[in-house]
Amino acid sequence: MGHEAARRVTEFLHDRIEADLRTVVVIREDGHDIHYLREDLRERYDGETYGDVVDTFRLEDPYTSPGVEDQPVGERRGIVHYHEHAFVIQFPVSDAESVLISLSRDSGQNLLEFLETCRHRVVESS
């Protein structure tokens, strides 16, 4: 399930933002699978270092936000991390998988529309 979601969103992002796409990875309970890693980042990270970075985004429960299920904000659809050099966006695919996307900061224009379009690509067949 996660690999098909990663393929769809990678294809969309590559067509839409090209070089601003940094990485797409499927995070599983027992590890991760790199679906896309931009060439300059492949040169910068070895497997262990990249794995350490991915582990910082591991969620214990990708679907719930503690204490907000019944609040007006509703269910969690994704998480946006805003970093110095990138946006990192995480979409839950199942109870055991999520798709993590890293984008350059320049790709953040019209963020809501962009996030919803990406999310639909991820959850399309879930």
Image (tube, grey):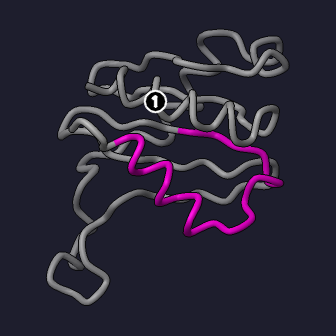
How many dots with numbers? 1
Q: Quadrant of the N terminus?
A: top left
Q: Position of residue 67 (x, y in %)?
A: 21, 78
**In the rendered structure, which segment of residues is drawn in magenta?**
101-122
In the displayed structure, would residue 76 be above or below residue 126?
Answer: below
Q: Is residue 88 left or right of residue 90?
A: right
Q: Position of residue 24 (x, y in %)?
A: 56, 29
Q: Residue furthest front?
A: 15
Q: Position of residue 34 (x, y in %)?
A: 52, 17
Which residue is label 1 attached to? 8
The stretch drawn in magenta includes residue 42 = no
The stretch drawn in magenta includes residue 106 = yes
The amino acid marked with disc number 1 is Arg
Q: Is residue 77 left or right of residue 44?
A: left
Q: Which residue is at 37% across, 31% downward?
A: 5
Which sits in the foreground, 16 or 74?
A: 16
Picture quadrant of residue 64: bottom left
In the displayed structure, would residue 122 be above or below residue 68?
Answer: above
Q: Position of residue 123 (x, y in %)?
A: 30, 44
User: In the structure shown, which secondary structural element does the residue marked by tag 1 occupy?
Assistant: helix
Q: Which residue is at 70% across, 43% downward?
A: 103
Q: Which residue is at 77% across, 33% downward?
A: 18
Q: Is residue 45 left or right of residue 28?
A: right
Picture quadrant of residue 6: top left
